[in-house]
Amino acid sequence: MSRFLFVVPPFVGHINPAAAVAAELTRRGHRVAWAGLPGLVEELAGPDADIHPCEVPRDLRRPPELRGAAALRYLWQDFLAPLAMAMAPGVERAAAAFRPDVIVADQQALSGALTAERLGIPYATSATTSAEFSGALAGMPKVDEWIHGLLAGLRAELGDPARTHDPRFSPDLVLAFTTTALTGESAAPPQTRFVGPALARRPDTTPFPWEWLDPARHTVLVSLGTANTDLGGRFLTECAAAVRERSPHLQAVIADLGGVLEGTWDDTVLAVRRMPQLALLRRASAVVCHAGHNTVAESLLHGVPLVVAPIRDDQPVIAAQLTTAGAGIRVRFGRGDRHAIGAALDAVLTAPEYRAAARRVQESFRAAGGAAAAATHLEEVATPIEENEEVAPTGQGEPGRS
């Protein structure tokens, strides 16, 4: 039995895959603990989770108008770096109390990797987005240099100054919750294992009026994620209008966290604060979203094509991967109106090549092994292969490609 400490940022999309892997490790008899924001981790990992609290910056919201380079600078300078500094004392206390064999550090919870290297604990990287493998900064050397300078400063404060590797990529294991069927040929380091999406087995108890769904019409899910509530009002309104123009053969469930469409419930558009997304994906014909990695991956795992409107951060990268794979269409978030959104929906619902491409990615995701493959790779980090040669690991995932 081994001990695994998961270090996660306060983001739903980063905790959900980790929760699925943690549940699989627990099922196999290992001990699991968490370092993160207690309320959010408990909600997603379950009430029995062993949680060691970490401080996080008080204001997790950022100015909604930020885009491009300004958004990237804010993400690193005003969020990820302060998050690392705020979480580090809690991570160190968790390591001292739990005594993990392996720390599983989310790529955006930098204190996990840096604390592990300073304490001499093996760590694995949990990469919940493939953007870091895309080479997106290859044409921006000054930006890349600036980020590495910031990482060096954090390492001097929190890690082992003698180490030289990029802390976002563990030298032992990087778990990528996608496959190259979506990312294409990747710049991932060779210790990367592409395991596909990892979904928790816990049932989603979110209430939903299932009788509302009309089996004679296509169902479209619309979601802009949990971090874009302040931005999405106009876009959600245009999505609702596009669907209403196609009401004879289309209906939509819209995740409306900000209450922009408050009270909207007719036979064509249903706006809800929360939706049981995975259960609805089994009934969906298409998804409209912001190209957040989790929503894209979960949709493709169900063979559902997408219309994506990326806003910022890794979303343009994921959108480009999706369209290159042929499993969806991109529209402009700022200018996308009911006509553009409607035309894109018409295409992904009627042109068979989009669904065929989504199913090709779906097959690669299923073959990669998900949470089971990730758990096996983590077990190998906890128990070096030379000590366990007689054990035939299952669910190997897809090796990294450099």
Image: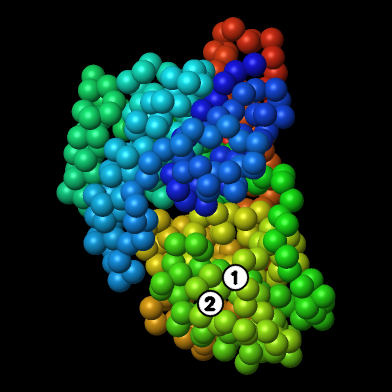
Q: How is the image coloured?
A: rainbow
* Residue 316 picture location, percent across and down: 40, 62
From the viewer's side, name the closer residue of 220 and 79.
79
Q: Of label 1 and label 2, which has the lower sequence position?
A: 2
For mark 1, what is the residue? 273
Determine whether 41 is above or below 28 in the image. Answer: below
* Residue 213 picture location, percent across and down: 78, 76
On screen, residue 309 versus residue 220, left or right, reads left
On screen, residue 249 versus residue 344, left or right, reads right
Specify whether residue 351 is in view.
no
Task: State the residue at coordinates (26%, 52%).
Answer: 78
From the viewer's side, name the closer residue of 24 and 350.
24
Task: State the residue at coordinates (24%, 44%).
Answer: 147
On screen, residue 107 versus residue 6, left or right, reads left
Mark 2 Cα within 10 Å, few/some/many (few <14, many 20+)?
some
Determine whether 303 is above or below 143 in the image. Answer: below
Secondary structure under badge 2?
A: loop
Secondary structure under badge 1?
A: loop
* Residue 281 picture location, percent across and down: 70, 63
Q: Residue 113 lies in what quarter of the image?
A: top left
* Residue 292 picture location, percent across and down: 49, 59
Determine whether 389 is above or below 181 in the image. Answer: above
From the viewer's side, name the closer residue of 254 and 369.
254
Circles 1 and 2 in contact, beta carbons < 8 Å: yes
Specify whether residue 199 is in view.
yes
Question: Given the image, on which type of amino acid does mark 1 rest?
Answer: Arg
For mark 2, what is the residue? 259
